[in-house]
Image (cartoon, helix red, strand yellow):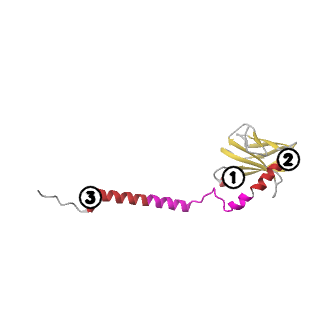
Amino acid sequence: MQAHPAPPWYKQFWPWFLIGLLMLSIGVSSTFAFLAVLSADGMVQEDYYEHGRAINMVLAKQERAADLGLQARLRIDPLTSDVVLDLEGDSRPERLDLELIFPTQDDRDIELVLEHVRDGRYLGQAPDNLRYRWYLQLQPEGDSPEWRLVGEARFPDENVIALTPGRPAAE
């Protein structure tokens, strides 16, 4: 009986298969590490601690809006992008800031200025083709607004959107 001599390791399948798996995992993990370092995380704010501490100020603004009996009804026309807002309560500033906040990408946030026309009605212009879900914040124009109303909407929407001092809600 003659034993066949074993071929050298580099001529066999299994060592190359295991080396290939190792190289593939190194390549994939290196690619993901490169992408993680290259792309910025837009969800994490640089001043997250200060932002967290400021939440009490935001709650105070919403409480002030409730004390003034404020609430608003907002409609954005899907064809013309006209913004019509009716404000009810004890405050009628000449201009309002309406902030449309995109939930996942802060570079898509939009700030609109609404002009008072008569009896609590405000008008403005939104960008064309507004789509997807947005958080809404309404407050008087200025550096330190006295009150804030909040809401949530999914565009395009022809329905009226309620902005209230409390938790976001849509009609």
User: Which residue bears the numbered disc 1?
Assistant: 109
Query: What residue lies at 25% left-to-right and 60% top-to-bottom?
Result: 11
Of labels 2 and 3, the one closer to you: 2
Q: Residues within 10 Å of mark 2 (few under 14, many from 20)?
A: few
**Which image quarter: residue 51?**
bottom right
Q: Which residues are magenta?
A: 27-53
Q: Residue 88 placed where, x, y %?
A: 85, 42
Magenta stretch: residue 46 in it?
yes
Q: Amino acid at mark 1?
A: Asp
Disc 3/disc 1 C-alpha distance (Å): 59 Å
Which of the two residues, 135 or 60, is positioned nearer the viewer here?
60
Residue 131: give its label: none
Residue 88 left/right relative to 40:
right
Helix, strand or loop under label 2: helix
Residue 127 seen:
no
User: Which residue bears the numbered disc 3?
Assistant: 12
Residue 113 left/right relative to 21:
right
Query: What residue lies at 70% left-to-right and 42% top-to-bottom?
Result: 153
User: Which residue bears the numbered disc 2?
Assistant: 67
Helix, strand or loop under label 1: loop
